[in-house]
Amino acid sequence: MLLPFSNGSAATRNLAKAMLNAAQLAMFDAHNPDILLLPENEGATPAEAASAARTLLSEGAEVIIGPLFAQSVTAVAPVARDRGVPVIAFSTDRAVGGDGVFLLSYQPETEVKRVVSYAAAHGHSNFTGVIPRNAYGDRVLGAFKAVAAADKVTVRAVLRFDPGTTDLSQTASAASASGADAILIAQGGTQLAALAALLGPTHPQLLGTGLWAERSLAREASLSGGWFAAPPPRADANFDGHYRAIFGTEAPQLAPLAYDAISLIAALTSGKPYHRFTDAALLDPNGFSGVSGVFRFNADGSCDRGLAILAVTPEGFRIVDPAPRSFQAPGS
């Protein structure tokens, strides 16, 4: 396992520690004595990540879990590929996936497709996107245009904004004037609440990505009735309680990914060493069950997830369309 234990950011170091905690918890829960977890420091540079990967491979690693950051994944991938060892990384950047790299992460493309398709299926035909001007926003925009074309709905406007700005009045006015009956806001936190408030109480249907899934937004009045796509909150409730009981603190949002990675490895350990974590095994079209719902890998390294549609209500987040429990078509 490669994680950024010595990163310059205290928040990132704490996240790395929590993900290792979750991995160790999964080791305990798997009751599989044949798994050995070797943690190594991803470091602060791609070169350090590549060096750590070489260390793990020299110690006999059959699969590398991590790294967290895209540039580290890019550096580690050829090192692992030379030895025929798969990498199950946590980056959300689809560009670094594929050719032996599988991204076990929450990816905005999947969230956008789920929420826009749900809205289209429920009578909405004119969409506007309010999207930050950054790398995350670029990926949201690509997915937004693709799903709009696939679902044969109209994109009325795409409004980009600076993620650091405090004046969103012009953006909100343009969204209101766009003629859309659904507005996708690909932002979270205080900027999301501010945008929604500026749209007023009679705004069109609001849509969001997993960035909406913050506890601070669960009862946000300006978002009331808004829909967003995210892992089903009840799916990982047992994990959260288990983690809290063992480590005495709340698990960060990404911790379940590390737990799922170890659980996946435990499920695939039967077979001949160095011949069990194959592409065929990892690309099982039926996918796998994780603490945040079902997931499966695609040939390009991306990850499909069974996402729920949640609504913001005065009582908190409420599931309005449950996540699928499998990837099999109904009746199959």
Image (cartoon, helix red, strand yellow):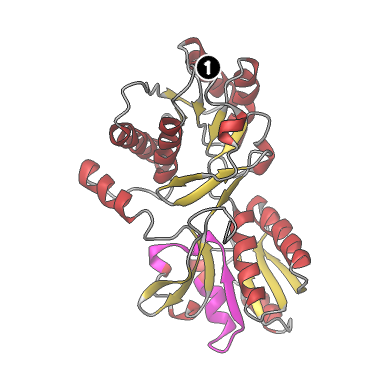
Residue 163 visible: no
**Mark 1 lies on residue:** 274
Assess whether residue 215 is covered by the magenta stretch: yes
Where does the magenta region start and end? Answer: 193-216
Q: Is residue 273 left or right of residue 134?
A: left
Image position of 223 with respect to 326: above or below: below
- Give the percent coordinates (x, y) of residue 92: 58, 45
- Give the percent coordinates (x, y) of residue 186: 60, 64
Q: Residue at x 55, y 19 (%)?
A: 275
Image position of 95 with respect to 193: above or below: above
Residue 197 visible: yes
Q: Is residue 179 left or right of residue 302?
A: right
Closest to the observer: 222 or 146? Answer: 146
- Give the percent coordinates (x, y) of residue 9: 44, 39
The image quarter containing residue 207 is bottom right
Image position of 133 with respect to 182: above or below: above
Tag 1: amino acid: Tyr
Q: Residue at x 47, y 30 (%)?
A: 268
The image quarter containing residue 124 is bottom right
Q: Residues within 10 Å of mark 1 (few under 14, many from 20)?
A: some
Q: Residue furthest front?
A: 331
- Give the percent coordinates (x, y) of residue 232: 44, 60
Determine the secondary structure under disc 1.
loop
Q: Residue at x 32, y 56 (%)?
A: 237
The N terminus, quarter of image: top left
Q: Residue at x 36, y 60 (%)?
A: 234
The C terminus, quarter of image: bottom right
Assess whether residue 50 is covered by the magenta stretch: no
